[in-house]
Amino acid sequence: MAAVSASGTSAVSTASAPPALRDPHIPADGLYEGHRELRRVPEGWEDRPYELFGLVPQSRTIGAEIRGLDLSVPPSPAVRDELNRALLEWKVLFFRGQRLTSDAQRAFALNWGRLETNPLLTAGDTDEVARFDRTTVPTFENVWHTDVTFRERPALGAVLQLREVPPAGGDTMWADMAVAYDNLPREVRDRIDGARAVHDFVPGFARFYPAERLAPFQDVFPPVEHPVVRTHPETGRRMLFVNASFTTRVVGLEQAESDRLLRLLFQQAHVPEYQVRFRWQAGDIAFWDNRATQHYAVADYGTHRRVAERVAIAGDRPY
């Protein structure tokens, strides 16, 4: 309605309409900008100080350097329990300059349960020690993944030591999949809670091995189903449990719909706020909770040599 001026004449409002914009729509299966909730521990968790070693956080929710421990010395029950609490709270622990023998590395891992072997990997001193050296065999780099989810009982965790490091590069990154789940849109969480997905060793290893190498293992490792969102058996926290190496489809969905949903879920590991990145020195150890994380070995070191050895701890059936 036109306004009336003091002189009695009509005056037209000078307020301008907002400029017209093109449709701001973006695809629904992209990553999301804006605020992210970065919660390190479950709601109601008692956050206590560490008394038996030093702990230096490496990011907001994931990754901590442990100081003041010699892993070649068997930990007391109290130290083991406090380390386990640190593992649950920080998901991956780093220990500088340990230089463990293979026997000592195995002995440390055994504090968390029996060890598993993987016939698809090159063995080190024993079958329980997997050796990664891409100058001789493929080393499974450059992809976000959770180890051995193609097993009915994927690994609880792993203890990795770098024997030889390149002069630059060769870092490893880990992503917090509990925080990734927390920050999914509500409609996505509602869709995947209770869903199950198929995991298969073939896609991950076919990137590196010829078919004749993999064919004999198809009966040993048939496809298995796991929940898309698993519950951590020690903390009760919900975590996204699919990965680009081994998860092939969501049960009950057409392949195209499943592929689109999985692309969205795979992308969550790529969010920097959910990650920690570790720059290795020879003799360093990383110990991670395989139930709660994905990891990514960065292959940016050219023709230099990088040698790592890993011991994996057998896990339980996800639920």
Image (cartoon, grey):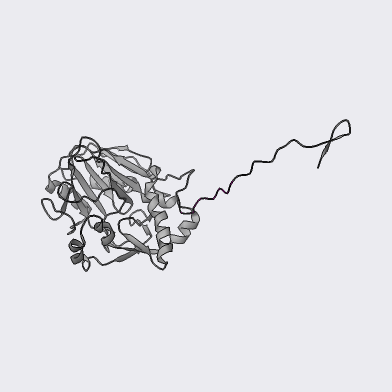
The x, y position of residue 124, in whole percent, is 12, 51
The x, y position of residue 241, in whole percent, is 35, 57
Q: Which residues make up the magenta segment? A: 22-29
Q: Quadrant of the N terminus?
A: top right
**Closest to the observer: 73 or 155?**
155
Q: Residue at x 40, y 65 (%)?
A: 255
The prevailing secondary structure element of the residues shown in magenta is: loop
Q: Is residue 310 left or right of residue 317?
A: left
In the rendered image, the residue lying farthest to the left is: 125
Q: Residue at x 30, y 44 (%)?
A: 173
Q: Does 15 lie within the magenta span?
A: no
**One can see residue 86 in this view:** no
In the rendered image, the residue lying farthest to the right is: 8
**Closest to the observer: 92 or 173?**
173
Residue 72, above or below 209: above
**One can see residue 226 in this view:** yes
Q: Is residue 8 left or right of residue 155?
A: right
The x, y position of residue 36, in whole percent, is 46, 44
Q: Residue at x 29, y 66 (%)?
A: 223
The x, y position of residue 165, in whole percent, is 19, 39
Q: Can you tell which quarter of the image residue 242 is in?
A: bottom left
**Closest to the observer: 117 or 33?**
33
Q: Quadrant of the C terminus?
A: bottom left
Residue 71, above or below 243: above
In the rendered image, the residue lying farthest to the top is: 7
Q: Residue at x 42, y 67 (%)?
A: 254
Number of dots carrying numbers: 0
